[in-house]
Amino acid sequence: MEKLEQRIEQHIHTLREFTSTPLRGVTRLTYSHEDLQARNYIKEKMKEFGLQIREDGFGNIFGKLEGTLKDAPSVMIGSHFDSVPNGGAYDGPAGVVAGLEVAALFSKNKLIPKYPLEIVALVEEEGARFGGGLMGSRGIVGTLSEEDFKIQKDKDGISTEEAMSKIGLDPSLPKKRDPKTMKAFLELHIEQGPTLEEKNIPIGVVEAIVGLTQLEVTVEGQAGHAGTTPMDRRSDTLVTAAKIIGQLPGLAIEEGEGTVITTGRLHVFPNGANVIPEKTVFTVDIRSGKEENVRNVIRKTKELIQSYCENGIHTSVEELLYIQPKALNEDIRSLLKQQSSQLEIPYCSINSGAGHDAMVFSDVTDVGMIFVPSKDGLSHCQEEWSDSHHLANAVQILYEAAKNLTEAE
């Protein structure tokens, strides 16, 4: 167990170094130089553990241990390896590392599964470069079409295909995957909240994942000189956006039921200190455990935004992402609890307030997910940290679950 913990720490430490913001957290955007560094490391470890490696037309990485059954569906384990700007070292990579270590245990114990084992490292879960999020998993299951993928551009106008080609990836490779090739998907993730740490419980078995939507709001008006344009003659998009944003939290509070709403990204054009902003674009992230609450707040948000179309101001809303709340597979939840009990690792049931690739895969295959505690409940910041002992516990649980799933009919 101690050696497993040391290997996990080494993986995390190495991947942490692949950042464009040294000493200021992990910034590893999809299809960046840092993506390529992390990608090469992951593939190197997959090869070391005897896996057959391939990448798809989105740049997702798959490492496969063939089973004895011909053309059988795979038991998949993995997570994402991109980050938010100035984020932490554990959100996503911890799940990829867990998958690698499960493969290492299969290799060490010379296990040949009946059904294939497949370790998966997914791109653009965070949506930090191309928006929307969950791009790799949505592409695999087909809810992100090839056409929609191609038209995605980052803030500098670089398209997905251009960015892929720049680091040597091939966007012409197959993209959507046949659901019949997936027997199950397992994901480990840090909790990103305080519950497990406060309860002093090392494992959370996820029952359900919150529903979420991401909107992109555009406010258009008229640029003008900051000194010569009278206040009553202005169509100032930033002032309008600020008025809208200031009212959004009240919509979530009014809805209740744990509904939350966040504006996390804002771009002002032309972004000059002495120019009245002619366009402002911002995001709205809405989440709740019940779909009716998400839908209600989306409707109220759109009505609020529309109400500001006056005095030379035009507003529009684009829905970048909509995913329903998802209950995870009952049989796999039971299996994960059973394995935890057999290993004498305490666990509790828990719901996820964050979206994950697991929720996307749950539409097409059986999915299970486990959480490990996050120190002080922190995530999406450089202080993010999870204990390697807890991660090693999770690897043992996933290993036993994978052995069961790769053998069971």
Image (cartoon, rainbow, N blue to C red):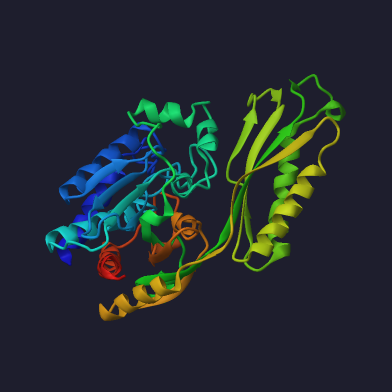
Residue 251, position as x, y percentages in the image: 72, 57
> Does any portion of residue 135 appear in the rendered image?
yes
Q: Quadrant of the N terminus?
A: bottom left
- Quadrant position of residue 276: top right
Residue drawn 53% across the image and 35% down it: 147
- Quadrant position of residue 21: top left
Closer to the camera in the image, 80 or 281 = 80
Q: Is residue 335 above or below residue 39?
A: below
Q: Quadrant of the C terminus?
A: bottom left
Is residue 189 toward the left or the right of residue 311 in the image?
left
Residue 335, position as x, y percentages in the image: 35, 75
Residue drawn 44% across the image and 43% down it: 124
- Quadrant position of residue 266: top right
Is residue 175 toward the left or the right of residue 66 in the image?
right
Residue 293, position as x, y percentages in the image: 68, 63
Closer to the camera in the image, 47 or 180 = 180
> Does any portion of residue 154 appear in the rendered image?
no
Is residue 243 toward the left or the right of residue 90 in the image?
right
